[in-house]
Image: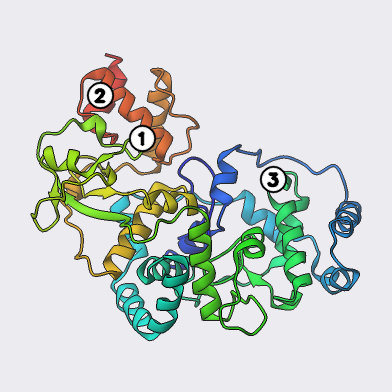
């Protein structure tokens, strides 16, 4: 699972653009959140040799209870890799709209394959849902996005990657605990050092767990005495559900539902940070995608417009916040939740007028962010990503200029920002 850089960075991963994109986007349950705390310098320099650093780290591992047997077994893999550092410091930014992102990550075969796997492992999924309350489509969507159902879990030696990133000056506070957790996974008997092959950022398994999440949430669901998230499908699926439950999944509740919206709404209420009872949205004329009325109940929901009022519209329920905890990229989370809905039987989304909207790619978004910052709307770092912080700044600017505040940029907003009035 993934935590990524910046407010809307991938918990890291997308599949070359089938696979490269997945591996970039998927990186680790937790990295996105951690990286959002700070944007470390890419050009920092280490002041200590790797050998000296490793000696200190091994002493720390001993104090933390890692056995000498494990340290001896792991030591041949605790090496420095210039390649890993180069990848980490040279990550490319993929600036895609929600529709582009979803189209790339959810090709038709992933829906067909996902539904087949739900049928194939129906008994396992039934046991998992009884225990953890997480339905099969939700689990399978992450399985598909994170590793293409186990076909693409990474090819790097995890201990080498983690040791390199824990030593490197850019983000040692993030990766040092992950390296220690990886050693404890070995100590517990779940994996051998040679088996620990995963992403370049040290994530492991078919749904890309950071080692700390592996250590704390992986479960032995096939009963063989090991928690093997690389090869045991029951362990992979149940561990994914266990983690989702731990971060707040609510049994028996929906997560994302496509809806139809009227041409006029109080657009400022369309915000993932704002929840209203479902009856509130029903009174405003929001209807289900098939045209039927929404239930007039008190289930809280946010109106999510990933491409503004002219694009697809969704009601995002409390379980959607779990997706954002998995990966704080709004594009990734919406895509994963939509994919799960499709696996559960929902039809393809209505595109509205989104296909004709002006593109806001990397360059356009940097211009937008610079203008927003110049006018005092606090878009944050000029990073070319139309993430949650930038969208919030867009909303503030729209309200200021008296434009429909749907949090999505338009040529009219750009023009007003340029004029400053």
267 vs 80, nearest the viewer: 267
265 vs 100, nearest the viewer: 265
Q: Is residue 15 something that shows in the picture?
A: no
The image quadrant of residue 136 is bottom left
- Circle 2 SS class: helix
Left or right of 135, for residue 232: right
Q: Give the distance between the C-alpha atoms of the residues marked 2 and 3, in whole angstroms.
A: 39 Å
Label 3 with label 1: CB-CB less than 8 Å:
no
Q: Which residue is mark 1?
A: 391
Left or right of 231, for residue 331: left
Q: Which residue is mark 2?
A: 415
Mark 2 / mark 1, whichever is N-terminal:
1
Question: Measured from the top left, where is residue 227 in percent x and y?
Answer: 64, 75
416 vs 123, nearest the viewer: 123
Tell me the number on the disc at residue 171.
Answer: 3
Tell me the number on the disc at residue 144.
Answer: none
Q: Is residue 98 something that shows in the picture?
A: yes
Residue occupying the point 42% across, 27% down: 370
Say which of marks 2 and 1 sits in front.
Answer: 1
- Circle 1 SS class: helix
Question: Measured from the top left, where is residue 276 in percent x and y?
Answer: 26, 38
- Circle 3 SS class: loop
Mark 2 / mark 3, whichever is N-terminal:
3
């Amino acid at each position: 699972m993934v935590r990524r850089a910046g407010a809307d960075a991938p918990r890291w991963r997308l599949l070359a653009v089938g696979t490269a994109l997945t591996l970039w986007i998927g990186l680790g349950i937790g990295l996105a959140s951690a990286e959002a705390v700070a944007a470390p310098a890419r050009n920092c320099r280490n002041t200590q040799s790797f050998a000296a650093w490793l000696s200190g780290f091994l002493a720390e591992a001993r104090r933390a209870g890692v056995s000498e047997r494990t340290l001896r077994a792991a030591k041949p893999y605790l090496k420095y890799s210039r390649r890993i550092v180069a990848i980490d410091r040279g990550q490319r930014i993929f600036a895609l709209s929600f529709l582009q992102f979803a189209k790339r990550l959810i090709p038709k075969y992933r829906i067909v394959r996902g539904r087949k796997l739900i049928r194939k492992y129906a008994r396992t999924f039934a046991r998992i849902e009884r225990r953890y309350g997480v339905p099969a489509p939700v689990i399978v969507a992450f399985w598909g996005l994170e590793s293409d159902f186990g076909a693409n879990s990474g090819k790097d030696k995890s201990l080498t990657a983690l040791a390199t990133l824990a030593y490197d000056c850019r983000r040692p506070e993030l990766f040092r605990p992950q390296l220690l957790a990886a050693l404890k996974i070995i100590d517990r008997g779940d994996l051998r050092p040679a088996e620990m092959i995963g992403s370049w950022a040290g994530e492991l398994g078919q749904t890309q767990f950071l080692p700390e999440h592996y250590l704390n949430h992986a479960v032995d669901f096939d009963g063989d005495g090991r928690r093997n998230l690389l090869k045991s499908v029951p362990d992979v699926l149940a561990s994914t559900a266990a983690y989702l439950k731990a971060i707040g999944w609510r049994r028996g509740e929906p997560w994302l539902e496509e809806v139809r919206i009227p041409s006029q709404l109080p657009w400022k209420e369309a915000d993932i940070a704002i929840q209203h009872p479902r009856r509130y949205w029903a009174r405003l004329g929001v209807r289900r995608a098939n045209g039927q009325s929404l239930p007039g109940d008190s289930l809280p929901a946010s109106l999510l417009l990933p491409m503004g009022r002219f694009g697809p519209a969704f009601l995002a329920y409390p379980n959607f916040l779990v997706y954002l905890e998995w990966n704080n990229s709004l594009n990734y989370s919406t895509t994963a939740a939509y994919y799960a809905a499709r696996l559960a039987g929902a039809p393809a989304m209505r595109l509205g007028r989104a296909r004709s909207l002006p593109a806001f790619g990397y360059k356009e978004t940097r211009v937008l962010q610079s203008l927003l910052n110049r006018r005092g709307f606090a878009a944050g770092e000029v990073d070319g990503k139309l993430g949650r912080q930038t969208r919030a700044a867009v909303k503030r600017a729209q309200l200021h200029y008296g434009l429909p505040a749907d949090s999505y940029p338009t040529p009219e907003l750009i023009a007003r920002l340029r004029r400053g009035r």
